[in-house]
Image (spheres, rainbow, N blue to C red):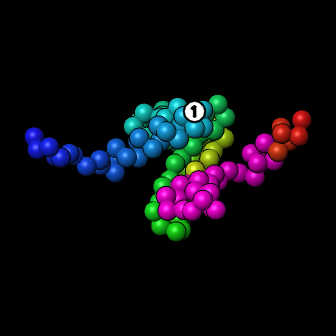
Amino acid sequence: MKPFDFQPISKKEKTLKYEKKLAKELKGIPQPASGAIAGFKGDIRTTDLLVDSKQTVMSSFRLSLTDLHKITKEARGVNKFPCILITFEETTRVMPGKWAVIPIEVLTELIDKKGE
């Protein structure tokens, strides 16, 4: 082996590593195989949420109704609220890099809980 010979990290490995870090931040657990196994859909499971994590280095991200239907169906199947978490990797300190997309019903419930 050469002194500086290293294997680059694959996109899949980088994604799994990021999801593990994100799961810790959300006080959740990463799903095995990033949701590719039946019964373990989504990327991260928290007490209340099933999270589908998306990352981009671009300045925009296309979110489709199909994406929303998919995570909603999967979340209902495990009695969780659906959430799509989008991470923009190229951001500044002024603008947050992580954004969560949740149904309005979930948002109002969280607001109500905070007001109690």
Amino acid type, callout 1: Gly
Of residue 44 and residue 10, the one placed in the foreground of this image is 10
Kind of element beneath mark 1: loop
Per the rendered image, the range of residues in magenta is 86-110
Question: Seen in the image, is 32 located left or right of residue 111?
Answer: left
Corner quadrant of residue 50? top right
State whether residue 59 is above or below residue 5.
below
Q: Residue furthest bottom?
A: 59
> From where the camera sits, is residue 79 visible?
no
Question: Seen in the image, is 110 located left or right of residue 30?
Answer: right
* Residue 88 sits inside the magenta stretch: yes
Q: Residue furthest right?
A: 116
State whether residue 38 is above or below residue 83.
above
Residue 54, image x, y percentages: 50, 53
- Residue under label 1: 28
Residue 75, image x, y percentages: 60, 40
Corner quadrant of residue 106? top right
At x 11% / y 44%, what residue is drawn? Answer: 2
Question: Seen in the image, is 93 located left or right of residue 58?
Answer: right
At x 53% / y 68%, what residue is drawn? Answer: 60
At x 41% / y 46%, what residue is drawn? Answer: 15
Q: Residue furthest left?
A: 1
For the C terminus, which image quadrant?
top right
Question: Seen in the image, is 4 located left or right of residue 95?
Answer: left
* Residue 97 sits inside the magenta stretch: yes
Residue 7, image x, y percentages: 21, 46
Q: Residue furthest front?
A: 3
At x 45% / y 44%, what residue is drawn? Answer: 18
